[in-house]
Image: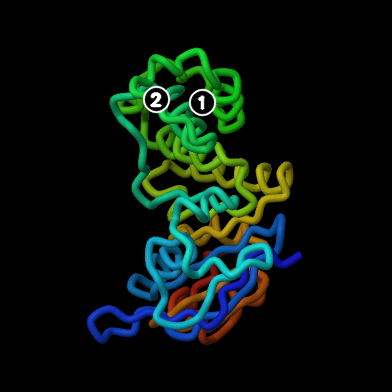
Amino acid sequence: MTLLVADGLAKAFGGNQVVGDVSFGIGAGEIVALIGPNGAGKSTCFNILSGQVRPDRGRVVFAGTDITALSPSRRWRLGIGRGFQVAATFGSLTVRDNVRVALLSRDRLVWRFLRRASALLSDEADARLAEVGILPLASQPASTLAYGDLKRLELALALSNTPRLLLMDEPTAGMTPPDRRSTMALLRHLAQAHGSAVLLTDHDMDVVFQIADRVLVLDKGRLIADGVPTEVRSDPQVRAAYLGNDDQHPV
């Protein structure tokens, strides 16, 4: 089933066409990578899909519903989770309380003081932390986490709404190679276990070609390739625009 459809998306800033007539679909359970050189329009495309930016033209359809005009919070409640290039967490709260806040937001519960909610949602928060492999760190302030663990916490926050679609902008940014591999294996597991679709962007081509079912390539705001990794890797236009002509990117 096609879960997300981007249909003719276009966006310009100050007369500069950043995204132009971009169309693609993502199926349930599919992991799709969006790659391209710096300035290709990847982040703008992500921001359009998550609702941070409204397109000048085109539409976004999720599970058969046109969501182009919906806010990020309404998209989140429909089942679209978002991870950012720079991890967005509350550094002064514990790891567990970060997840509790997300769960309280999901359930539309407003608390004047977080301690009033301290007995609520603990089991579910811990289940999310266990799922991403950082439950032993639950009582630590988020500000003390190593960067790889901070990105895992952000993933736990994105999972708090049991999303049907995860938008992951540079999920392995700043990680060591082993952390990159384990994070991508985790995303693969989550996609398979929950049937969630994943759209990610990453500059580590080794990671991209190993994890993605399909690869989309943007260049100067235009989609120049959409296919399985083997096809994209050998595409002359993609090599000229981004990959170069070496053979260092495995499939």
For residue 91, above or below residue 200? above
Q: Which mark is residue 96?
A: none
The part of the image, by quadrant, that contains residue 182 is top right
- Residue closest to the eye, 186 or 50: 50
**Residue closest to the eye, 83 or 207:** 83
Mark 2 highlights which residue? 111
Measured Cα–Cα span from mark 2 to mark 1: 26 Å
Quadrant housing the N terminus: bottom right
- State the residue position of label 1: 134
Task: Look at the picture and state if 24 lies above or below 236.
Answer: above
Residue in view at x 71 percent, y 58 percent:
28
Q: Is residue 17 above or below residue 99?
A: below
Q: Amino acid at mark 2?
A: Trp
- Describe the element under mark 1 as helix, strand or loop: loop
Q: Of 114 and 238, which appears nearest the observer?
A: 114
Density class for disc 2 (Cα within 10 Å; few <14, some 14-19, many ≥20) is few
Q: Position of residue 94 (x, y in %)?
A: 38, 21
Give, as a three-letter code, the residue at label 1: Ile
Q: Is residue 108 visible?
A: yes
User: Residues at badges 2 and 1 in contact (C-beta under 8 Å)?
Assistant: no
